[in-house]
Amino acid sequence: MTQHIAPSSRRARLRALVTAALCLAALAPAVPAAAADAGPDHDRALRRRLERLVHSPGGPPGVITVLRADGHTRVVRAGVADLATGRPPRIRDHMRIASTAKAFSAAVALALVDHGALGLDDTIRERLPQLPRDWGRVTLRQLLQHTSGLPDYTENPEFIAEVIADPHHHFDSRRLLDYVADEPLLFRPGSRYRYSNSDNIAVALMAEAVTGTPYEKLLAELVYRPLGLHDTSLPQGYRMPRPYLHGYDTTVSPPEDVSELLSASGVWASGGIVSTPADMTRFVRGYTGGALFGRSALQAQRRWIPGSSHPEGPGRNSAGLGIFRYETRCGTVLGHTGNTPGYTQLIAATPDGRRSLTFSVTSQINSGTPEQLRLLRAVQEDFVCALLRGRP
């Protein structure tokens, strides 16, 4: 049932949602179609943890997790994919992957580095001379590491106002940096860590500049095809492919479906990809395991500095190039997180890609909801322990 609210009240809620969304901003075998739900006692314990998350105040309507290890896939889920029908979440349901899309842009860039088309020390001045001169000394390495100092276009008041005025507005994705083109760098490149959505827009533009190929086609050629991703795409509009996990705003009662609230064109390479739990499992295993680029690029990717993903992942976080290290009480995994209205994501795997976790939630959880984030990170760490040790 849709809740009817006054236009002024709806605009206020939309402003809050948009602000939270934008400012807090071949190795892998296919997941079997018959992947079974949790059965053993320890998996039932994991399900209870998910149910605790779902039933917490303001908790998500649904959660689905995919653990892949030693040739076996375990699916643990709680709640529903659609409040209107009550059906459970499924591994081939589409979903917005939010900032885990940044790992895809890094995969494209590092594949091009591996092929010799790009260098990690290539600068904006060399590859994107149309961007502001003040940004020219920023390197690809700094963009991937979020140490560039580029101002974040999603924090620009004009951009936010346009989204609020028309959430389905079709942006020119390749001109998103125009919103901050008159702003200087926030700090000397390489001197600080600061997560910025602008970084991955610039990464995609660099990839297009050196190849003469649209970023969407580069994704298909360098990521989707090698890893066998058949249900992953980078749309421009706001419609979701069917079937999909419905994402909800749980700050209202009853929760409101916001799955198709925003146009993907406004986040593009920084967060616009739509995928499925099955495809994201394939992706994170190949991405962390070295299926997309060679050892030299892999070593460069894993030079860690202090920095966390948004939202923070389980355990202690540190940042590499388009990837984060999560050091938990049970061991270390590598991956990425993301959040957007209706969805929160974690993808992680062991450094060799042989064990992986995809953790998908149907509401937005970030630092704006600290108690939920604390619970989410604790549950995610339990799942990492189950992945690495076979038990929570």
Image: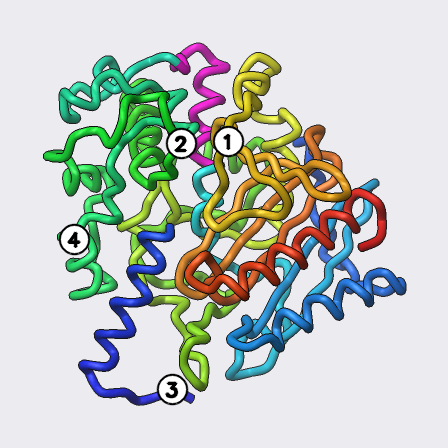
Neighbour class for label 1 at 10 Å: few (<14), some, many (≥20)?
Answer: few
Tell whether position 119 is magenta. Answer: yes
Neighbour class for label 2 at 10 Å: few (<14), some, many (≥20)?
Answer: some
Q: Are marks 1 and 4 in contact (CB under 8 Å)?
A: no
Neighbour class for label 4 at 10 Å: few (<14), some, many (≥20)?
Answer: few
- x, y percentage for residue 363? 49, 67
Q: Are marks 2 and 1 in contact (CB under 8 Å)?
A: yes
Q: Are marks 1 and 3 in contact (CB under 8 Å)?
A: no
Between tags 3 and 4, which lies in front?
Answer: 4
In this figure, which residue is indicated by the disc labeled 3? Answer: 2
> Can you tell which mark lies on residue 254?
none
In this figure, which residue is indicated by the disc labeled 1? Answer: 306
Between tags 1 and 4, which lies in front?
Answer: 1
* Region of the chain picked out in magenta, as a range: 104-120
Q: Helix, strand or loop at disc 4?
A: helix
Residue name at image x 17 percent, y 26 percent: 131
Q: Helix, strand or loop at disc 1?
A: strand
Residue name at image x 57 percent, y 50 percent: 346
> Can you tell which mark lies on residue 157?
4
> Outermost residue toward the top?
116
Question: Viewer-proximal residue, 180 or 221?
Answer: 180
Q: Helix, strand or loop at disc 3?
A: loop
Hey, what amino acid is under mark 2? Tyr
- x, y percentage for residue 225? 54, 34
Residue name at image x 32 percent, y 52 percent: 23
In this figure, which residue is indicated by the disc labeled 2? Answer: 193
In the image, taking residue 34 as reference, residue 118 lies left or right, namely: left
> Outermost residue toward the right?
41
Q: Mark 3 vs mark 2: which is more N-terminal?
A: 3
Q: Helix, strand or loop at disc 2?
A: loop
C-alpha separation, residue under disc 3 versus residue under disc 2: 42 Å
Q: Are marks 2 and 4 in contact (CB under 8 Å)?
A: no
